[in-house]
Image (spheres, rainbow, N blue to C red):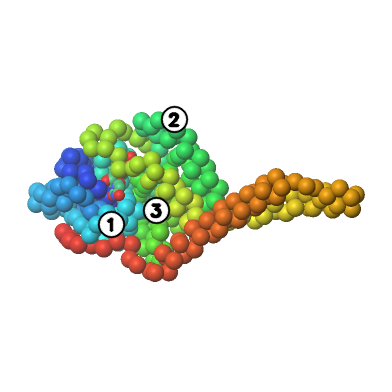
Amino acid sequence: MAKLSVVLPAFNEESMLSETAEVLESLLSAEQIEYELLFVDDGSRDGTWNSIVAAHEKEDRVKGIHLSRNFGKEAAIFAGLAKASGDCVAVMDCDLQHPPETLIAMYRLWEEGYEVVEGKKKNRGKENLVYGAGAGLFYKIMSRLTKMDMDNTSDFKLLDRKAVQALLSMPEKNSFFRAMSSWVGFRSTSIYFDVKERPAGKSKWTRFGLVRYAIANIVGYSAMPMQFVTGAGFLVFLLAIVLGIQTLVRYFGGKAVEGFTTVILLILLIGSTIMISLGIIGYYIARIFEEVKGRPKYLISEEIR
Ligand code: UDP
Ligand code: MG
């Protein structure tokens, strides 16, 4: 019989963990699906690991991986994918914001032969306006860059073993699960779900963290920001032609510009353009440096099989 692995990244989720495990256990047994629940403790500082151990003692289909420190959700997801043993692997949040019923629907789609089932958000849950607009802009840019429809995507997905293997074979250290799982192709479909409210605990994202995450992913997926440098260069060049002609005409007309102001303004404009450009290029170099170092995405300190 086919086995489903559910990968649940958990960072400081002690208040949710046993509830999530129980809800999934009872639902999956009721649906007669063979499963394993694979919790990935992403270096939590609360009792998450103890809760995973306790859940395993109650039900041995609960497995756990403990990362040596907080490596971030992306790394936790990949750690889970690497250790999952099922014929298909689902990834879901461990705060029950991803409805368990949708997991069953995804599994049924997999049984029908789909190899990648993507969960898409029907609503965006409780979010403020600025956050919603920011997320909207980010997904618009990402859809453009990746040439895939990334609108309303989430990390809630179910992948066939083939797709999991494909993801694991990608050597990049800075991974973006949402984009990579559609990049691999395969027979895919999507399913819409309502984002539920978090029953306990709180979201792990800070506003600054989200902005950093967005920039890292945009840079990770395209060289477009570097084309801004070229664009800025062209603009300054056009300005150079216009001002150059004007300066020469004045000079030969016998009344050279006395303007010190013009010089100051030009130095400021060009100086800042150059420095911003260097910053953009520097960011790419830093990212190349990180990849080249080739460090592992995560380190495991403990494991319950
Ligand atoms: N998470 C993680 N590592 C982190 C941050 C979050 O494994 O560094 C997990 C977290 O435990 C949860 C999921 O990622 O299971 C989604 O996080 P959260 O609910 O905080 O995000 P939101 O739902 O607000 O987007
Ligand atoms: Mg959440």
**Above-or-below relation of 282 to 56:** below
Please tell me how many numbered marks the rendered image carries: 3
Q: Report the residue at 67% width, 55% height from top.
A: 233
Sequence order check, earlier mark of 2 and 3 = 2
The mark found on residue 40 in the picture is none
Q: Residue furthest right?
A: 253
| Distance of label 3 from label 1 (alpha carbons) | 12 Å
Whether residue 172 is visible, yes or no, is yes
Sequence order check, earlier mark of 2 and 1 = 1
Quadrant of the rendered image containing residue 175: bottom left
Percent of width and height locating residue 37: 22, 51
Q: Report the residue at 49% width, 51% height from top.
A: 218
Percent of width and height locating residue 112: 37, 48
**Above-or-below relation of 271 to 19:** below
Whether residue 30 is visible, yes or no, is no
Which residue in the protein does label 3 denote? 177
Which residue in the protein does label 1 denote? 80
Q: Report the residue at 36% width, 63% height from top.
A: 168
Q: Are marks 3 and 1 in contact (CB under 8 Å)?
A: no
Circle nearer the viewer, 2 or 1: 2
